[in-house]
Structure formats: C-alpha cells, structure tokens
Amino acid sequence: MTNPVVSVIVPTKNSAATLEACLQSIKEQTYCPIELIVVDNHSSDTTQEIAKQFTDMVFVQGPERSPQRNLGARKASGHYLLMIDSDMELDGKVVEACISAVSTDSDISAVIIPEESFGVGFWSKCKQLERSFYQGVNFMEAPRFFSKAAYEAVGGYDESMVSGEDWDLSRRIERMGKVTRTSELIRHNEGRIKLQGALRKKYYYAYHARAYLSRNPERFKISSRVGPIQRYKLFLSRPSKLFARPLLGVAMLAMKTAEFASGSLGYIFGIWRKSREVS
C-alpha cells in the first residue's frame, strides 16, 4: 500500500538565519513521500534563495502567517498537512509518528506535536524553562498536523487573526474529530532573546488580538485555562522543576509577568485605536 503524501508548509519572513536548518530537518525525515511548500511574506533577505535550494514550490503571500498557511494548503497535493514555522526543526521521526498516530483511528483529525525550545543567552533559557511546563498540557499546545479534509472543512486558519489563530483552528478542528498527540518533538529555535524584544512581540500580538477574542471570549478571562492565573498555577505546581535553578525560575516568572503586562497594554491600546477609527 502506498504511503499518503504529507505536505509540509513553512511560512517565512526574513528567515534566512534559521530556514536552512528547518528545511534540512524536513528533508531528513524518515517518512516518505513528503511535499515541501514554502510561502514567503516578501522577505528582503536571502530567504527565498535558501528555500529554492530545497523545493520548487516557493510562493509569495502576506501579510501574516494565516494567509500564508492557507495558500500553502491550497497548493498542497498531500492527504495530510503539517504546519511548522521557519525557526523550528523537526526530530527525524516527527512525520512518521504523526502518520502512525492517525492510522490508529479514522476519527482522528489532527495531531499535537510537543515543542522544546533552545537558544542562546539567559532569557532564552527562561523561555526554554517556561515552554517545558506546557509539554503534555493539551490546552496549551495546538495541533500542527491535520487531515487536509478536516482542515478544508473548517476553512483553515482565520485570516482576520494575527494572533491566537492556532488555538482558534484547534477549537474548530476538535469539532470535526479527535485530536491526539505524538511524543516526537519540534525543537523551537528562540535564537538570542532580548527582554525588550520579547515584550514588544507580546504587545504586537495582543494589540491585534481583538479578532481572536471576539470569537473566543472565554480566553479573555484571566482565570481561563490559558490565562495568567492558570499559567502561574501550572508553573507553581512543580516547584522542584521551577526552582531547580532558583535564579532562572524567578527570572522566568518575572519575564512572564512582564509579558502579561505588555500584552495587556497592547490589547487596551488596540481596542482604543479601533474605537477611534470607528468614531
């Protein structure tokens, strides 16, 4: 029996620093056949040149990841879709494990692949510690591997969303069928995180979070499953892990608190700006 084609879709934007390692990890998968699709958002560096060394299926689309991913899905010929970012690297058996998972039950529509962060510098280590708490926690991890039929049935990613689009798609996919998980890892290259840059990123995504929160109002509550209260409970539920290196644990909590504050400001200013435009 012929293996089903898996289309791996990688959205990019000025991703030259990490893209080669990402695409090489796809090329080295144990599973075959894989169709590689790169959708670039008008990069000004050598992203497109690097992508063309690995695949002829390089397209241009913007302005954000959701339209890029949806274009990649429309171009895909695979029975399954795997969405990864250009700063991610796959363990060698990720695709094989996902196919194995969906093969056990025809009602499975999507697969969660846990992420493990790595990077350079102190704040990257803080982010690595934070993400390690999310592994195995379904409400913190959105699926990245989908049946194409289920993906198309729910309309793919909501292109009005700049942030929260992964969780939004996950919620809609869950209505189509079961979501399972694999133990194989995606390794997320955080690079060298600077605190100011991390806070700016949270501000940006929260500023544009209105579309997501209007469709998922329960996520707005600070006591929601992904809100600050539950995050702190999750971190503090494993004190031996959190404070194995006390300075790192305290710094991670401080970093997360600053991110929540920055996100709150971004959301407030986003609402204020929208109200000014309407008036």
Image: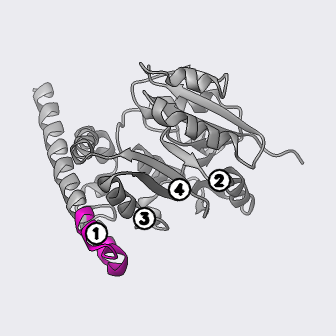
The kind of residue on which mark 3 rests is: Ser
Give how far across and how far down residue 42 sits, in percent: 44, 19
The Cα–Cα distance between marks 1 and 4, rounded to whole angstroms, is 34 Å
| Contact flag, marks 3 and 2 (Cβ < 8 Å) | no
Sequence-wise, the earlier of marks 1 and 3 is 3
- Is any part of residue 232 visible from this angle? yes
Q: Circle 4 is placed at which residue position?
A: 174
Sequence-wise, the earlier of marks 3 and 4 is 3
Q: Nearer the viewer, mark 3 or mark 4?
A: 3
Corner quadrant of residue 211? top left
The kind of residue on which mark 2 rests is: Val
Checking the image for residue 132, the label placed there is: 3
CA neighbours of label 1 inside 10 A, class few (<14), some (14 to 19), many (20+): many
Corner quadrant of residue 7? top right
Which secondary structure lies at badge 1?
helix
Q: Circle 2 is placed at which residue position?
A: 94
Checking the image for residue 249, the label placed there is: 1
Q: Is residue 211 left or right of residue 273?
A: right
Q: Nearer the viewer, mark 4 or mark 2?
A: 2
Sequence-wise, the earlier of marks 3 and 2 is 2
Residue under the point 61% across and 47% down: 146
| Contact flag, marks 4 and 2 (Cβ < 8 Å) | no
